[in-house]
Image (spheres, grey):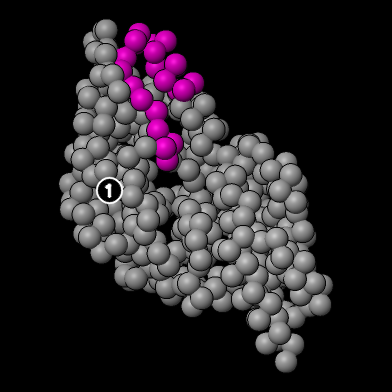
Amino acid sequence: MNEIPTASAEPDYARLADDIKAWGRELGFQQVGISDIALGESPARLGEWLARGFHADMEFMTETEKRTRPDVLIPGTRRIISVRMDYWPADTRADEVLRDPTRAYISRYALGRDYHKTVRKRLQKFADRITAAVGDFGYRAFVDSGPVMEKPFAAQAGLGWMGKHTLIINRNAGSYFFLGELLTDLPLPVDAPASAHCGTCTACLDICPTRAIVAPYELDARKCISWLTIEFEGVIPEELRRPMGNRIFGCDDCQLVCPWNRYARASREPDFLPRGNLGHATLLELFRWTEAEYLRATEGSALRRALYPVFLRNVAIGLGNAPHDPAIVAALAARLPEAGEVLAEHIRWALAEQRRKQA
């Protein structure tokens, strides 16, 4: 990647920083903060996390030099402009869906348009607005799309603190928001980091269905339902299948229980509003989708991160966890003859679970 060109003029950087935050809010970001590129203890903690194998098969996480050195990733980088954008829909019925084992729970961030596209386009408009004020300057935009430690940078920029579930929490907005960054060569003044306010609370650790949060601030991705249902394409360990319940794409439990999310505000961003019936669809309904129906229903959605066979695998587990129903048994049996090896393994397990409940 080419080096960032040097900004052509020397503006009043303190005033520019204030303007940048105002422009960000005008563009729909709820908060903008600025941090230095030094990461303190975060690189060491990342190394320990990797050494324990908590990154599962996400080998891209091992690009530690670029991940911990923004100036190596993008030469010339001097500051990180971090942004957050709320995504929580006003009426998600999240608790209601989780309590109904016949319905499919999809992490609420994935019910609308793919956030990568929305936030990235907004970041480009943000950069264009800065360019209009200062002329050409060096920057690269990232939205969960490269080796950038977005959460530590967001914390350093004052957007919130790292919660015990490893997500960023804002005392005025909870944790239901997306993060994005502009890596830039502008020597802007930095913001003060946010102080932590988790105290002695362990609600997120206690509620995790698979006990993936092994200790405060330590997440074992190999047990995390979000990783299992989105990133992992293989056979899910049998001991984790029942705890998954009806969660077929991601998991919000650690956020739903967080006391700070009582302050979460419903997103005003049209792109993040739930599409169609996905927020409360039944497992049986989704399991009957053809691949064409799946692709049509998930067009432009973060759900596309899961391939169709992975999606069916996840729904099969949910059907195995659902109460006994002859219609479920029939649907599972109908899929089995043409299922690939991985999907077939989970269908057979689900059928066994249904027979066990019938008995």
Mark 1 burial class by Cα count in 10 Å: few <14, some 14-19, many 20+ = some
User: What residue do we see at 60% from left, 45% from top?
Assistant: 304
Instruction: Say which of 290 and 143 sits in front.
Output: 290
The part of the image, by quadrant, that contains residue 250 is bottom right
Please give the range of residues in magenta.
124-145
Above or below, comparing residue 130 to residue 256 in the picture: above
Q: Is residue 106 visible?
A: no
Instruction: Say which of 276 and 344 sits in front.
Output: 344
User: What residue do we see at 71% from left, 65% from top?
Assistant: 337
Instruction: Identify the image quadrant of the C terminus.
Output: bottom right
The part of the image, by quadrant, that contains residue 342 is bottom right
Instruction: Say which of 303 and 259 sits in front.
Output: 303
Q: Is residue 43 visible?
A: yes
Above or below, comparing residue 307 to residue 211 in the picture: above
Q: Which amino acid does label 1 sit on?
A: Thr
Is residue 30 shown in magenta? no
Left of 309 or right of it: where is 169?
left
Which residue is disc 1 drawn over? 62
Left of 202 or right of it: where is 321?
right
Instruction: Say which of 197 and 116 sits in front.
Output: 116
User: What residue do we see at 65% from left, 70% from top?
Assistant: 347
Instruction: Identify the image quadrant of the N terminus.
Output: top left
Q: Position of residue 168 (x, y in %)?
A: 39, 51
Is residue 137 shown in magenta? yes
Q: Where is residue 167 in the image (x, y as percent from the top left)?
A: 40, 54
The part of the image, by quadrant, that contains residue 8 is top left
What is the secondary structure assignment of the residue under circle 1?
helix
User: What residue do we see at 61% from left, 76% from top?
Assistant: 349
Q: Position of residue 129 (x, y in %)?
A: 44, 16
Left of 40 or right of it: where is 147?
right
Q: Position of residue 99 (x, y in %)?
A: 66, 72
